[in-house]
Amino acid sequence: DQQVKQNSPSLSVQEGRISILNCDYTNSMFDYFLWYKKYPAEGPTFLISISSIKDKNEDGRFTVFLNKSAKHLSLHIVPSQPGDSAVYFCAAREPFGNEKLTFGTGTRLTIIP
Amino acid sequence: EAGVVQSPRYKIIEKKQPVAFWCNPISGHNTLYWYLQNLGQGPELLIRYENEEAVDDSQLPKDRFSAERLKGVDSTLKIQPAELGDSAVYLCASSSRGTRGTGELFFGEGSRLTVL
């Protein structure tokens, strides 16, 4: 049973437009949600996170929105740039000192110049 | 600040052979993780260390996989014997108490294993 789901394997967006990546989860006990970005042949790098007690967190061009009632989060990138082309993983952390992150399967974002 | 270092980056072996991966975490990070990433999937936790103690190894297939973190710094992940289905990327990550507030892990570049 996959607790964190990214239903879109790929997404193409024009440069300068908004990219919206979506993630759904089933475990209402997750206390933190994170987005990681991965380039080919590199390890994932942390992008942005949000606590389960918040509904929005913004960092420059990146904003993450959390809808707890829908068990849904999204990552907005605006404006999108060619360097944003990568695979984006949504991850959720289990609470109570358990450091385990559960990852989604990833969405490959391609920014079209 | 140096990142998480893993070696080898690539390894090709025949099935039933042993293989070992090494990880050096970020200096001062007391928590170390080994993740497995299959093609087209997200990383999955194999084992987590707090200093030298394995505090979560519930996902580690103990019949063929073993890991150690001597002195609470470097770590080695071993597979013996390797099977075809073990072909994947093995990721090491580390974190410190300062980064745990956000859940952030720092990943290495990974070790890609191909079993023939």
Image (cartoon, rainbow, N blue to C red):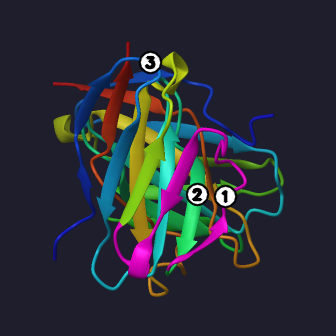
Amino acid of disc 3: Lys
Nearer to us of marks 2 and 3 is 3
Name the quadrant of the N terminus of chain B: bottom left
Is there a contact, CB below 8 Å, between mark 2 and mark 3? no
Q: Residue at x 71, y 74 (%)?
A: A53
| Sequence order check, earlier mark of 2 and 3 | 3
| Sequence order check, earlier mark of 3 and 1 | 3
Residue at mark 1: chain: B
Verify whether residue B58 appears in magenta: yes
**Quick one: label 3, few (<14), some, or many (20+) residues within 10 Å?**
some
Per the image, the residue denoted by label 1 is B57
Using residue B111 as the reference point, say whether residue B101 is left or right of it.
right
Q: Which residues are magenta?
A: B52-74
Image height of A67 relative to A50, above or below? above
Tags 2 and 3 both on a single chain: yes
**Residue B15 got which mark?**
3
Q: CA distance from mark 2 to mark 3?
A: 23 Å
Q: CA distance from mark 1 to mark 2?
A: 4 Å
Amino acid of disc 1: Asp
> B108 or A60: which is nearer to us?
B108
Verify whether residue B111 appears in magenta: no
Give coordinates of residue A62: x percent, y percent. 38, 56
User: Is label 1 in a helix, a strand or a loop?
Assistant: loop
Residue B62 in sight here? yes
Q: Residue at x 44, y 81 (%)?
A: B30
User: Is label 3 in a helix, a strand or a loop?
Assistant: loop
Is there a contact, CB below 8 Å, between mark 1 and mark 2? yes
> A100 or B114: which is nearer to us?
B114
> B112 or A70: which is nearer to us?
B112
Per the image, the residue denoted by label 2 is B47
